Each structure stands twice: as structure tokens, then as C-alpha cells.
Amino acid sequence: MATLNIILTIVLVLCSIVLITAVLMQQSKSGGLGESFGGATQSFTARGQRASKEAKLQKITVYSAIVIGILAIAIMIIE
């Protein structure tokens, strides 16, 4: 059981690093008043690529948070 606990702890730390990285890479949602009235003058393709990147980062954030929760519960049960 000690080996399984060590393996789960290592995976938990790696998932935590992935979660921290994904959160830090996301852009802030508050663009200010100027952006809400159309201040952004980017092309549609650049905006679409940015939205695609943000969607992937959001999915990574959700999945890694779920994995962290499951791993934390598993480690608690094993000990």
C-alpha cells in the first residue's frame, strides 16, 4: 500500500502543476469597459483561434481539477 500511496501522491503533484499552469495561461475575463463596446480590432480568425485555445485551457482546468479531487479522496481512503 505504501507504493500505491507514493504513486498516487506523485500523480497528484503532477496534476496540480498542470492545473496551476492551465490557470495561469488563461486570459482574464475582465477586459474593461473599452473592450465591451468593441474596442478589440482583431480579425475573426485570430479571435476564433484565441477562443479555441481558451476552450482547450478551460477543459484542461476542469479535467485536472476533477482528477485532483478523485486522487485526494483515493489517497485519503488508502491511508
Image (cartoon, grey):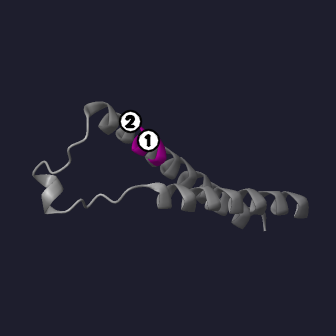
Instruction: Tell me the residue at 25%/41% (across/down).
Output: 42
- Is 27 displayed left or right of 12 in the figure? left
Residue type at mark 2? Gln
Q: Mark 2 points at which residue?
A: 49
Image spot of residue 9 (x, y percent):
76, 63
Q: Is mark 1 on a helix, strand or loop?
A: helix
Image spot of residue 52 (x, y percent):
40, 37
Residue type at mark 1? Lys
Mark 1 touches mark 2? (CB < 8 Å): yes
Q: Quadrant of residue 18?
A: bottom right
Instruction: Tell me the residue at 73%/63% (across/down).
Output: 75
The answer to whether residue 24 is magenta is no
Image spot of residue 1 (x, y percent):
88, 60
Q: What element carries label 2?
A: helix
Instruction: Tell me the residue at 55%/52% (across/down).
Output: 66
- Is 78 displayed left or right of 65 in the figure? right
Rendered position, 46 above or below 78:
above
Instruction: Locate the C terminus and report the quarter of the image it occupies.
Output: bottom right
Q: In which quarter of the image is residue 6?
A: bottom right
Image spot of residue 54 (x, y percent):
40, 45
Closer-to-camera residue (31/56): 31
Rendered position, 18 above or below 51:
below
Q: Which range of residues does the magenta coloring cover?
A: 52-57
- Is 22 displayed left or right of 71 in the figure? left
Mark 1–mark 2 Cα distance, whole angstroms, equals: 6 Å
- Magenta stretch: dominant secondary structure: helix
The mark found on residue 53 in the picture is 1
Q: Residues within 10 Å of mark 1 (few under 14, many from 20)?
A: some
Q: Quadrant of residue 45?
A: top left
Q: Residues within 10 Å of mark 2 (few under 14, many from 20)?
A: few
The number of discs equals: 2
The mark found on residue 20 in the picture is none
